[in-house]
Image (cartoon, rainbow, N blue to C red):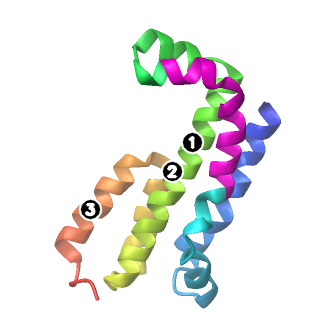
Amino acid sequence: MSTIFALSSLLVMPFWFLMIFLPRWRWTKRLLASVWVSALAAVLYTALVLPQIAQVLPAVLNPNLAEIASLLSTERGATIAWVHFLAFDLFVGRWVYLDSQNRQLSSWLISPTLFFVLMLGPFGFVLYLFIRQFRSAPAR
């Protein structure tokens, strides 16, 4: 599990690099236009969670703190959660990237915001929503 955990970030980091450091490059725009950007991480998540579905599904259908804490306290549980974060944070980051491009927001403003989406997921998303509200031109 430690190897999968360590290598899983490699599935998403190239896309984050492009969005943050090369946001106006034509290949960044071309790659990020695909809805399949998060697919590799989602496939890995699926491969990790399906063998554990008998434990995971009851816990998420009727969540309680002790059971969720127990699931996440194992190497397998932490790896599954990490890959979940990677897949969904990239999905949200891609949306932020595309929406900000569409609204012609400055990359100098959006690149740090994307960093926060990568590092702190929901916080970066809320930060972007505030920026979008107050700095945004109408969408094309």
Q: Residue furthest right?
A: 3
Q: How many marks?
A: 3
Q: Amino acid at mark 2?
A: Phe
Which label lies toward us, 2 or 3?
Answer: 2
Q: CA distance from mark 3 to mark 1?
A: 22 Å
Magenta-drawn segment: 40-58
Q: Are marks 2 and 1 in contact (CB under 8 Å)?
A: yes
- Magenta segment, prevailing SS (helix, strand or loop): helix
Q: Is residue 132 visible?
A: yes
Whole-angstrom CA distance, mark 2 to mark 3, is 17 Å
Question: Residue at label 2?
Answer: 88
Name the secondary structure under disc 1: helix
Q: Residues within 10 Å of mark 1 (few under 14, many from 20)?
A: some
Q: Quadrant of residue 36?
A: bottom right
Q: CA distance from mark 2 to mark 1?
A: 6 Å
Give the position of the C terminus as an image quadrant: bottom left
Which residue of the protein is positioned furthest toward the top in this rendering?
A: 66
Task: Kindly identify the residue that appears in the image at 40 percent across and 67 percent down.
Answer: 96
What residue did someone put label 3 on? Answer: 129
Q: Nearer the viewer, mark 3 or mark 1?
A: 1
Label 2 packing within 10 angstroms: few (<14), some (14-19), many (20+): some
Circle 1 sits on which residue? Answer: 84
Q: Residue at x 50, y 18 (%)?
A: 58
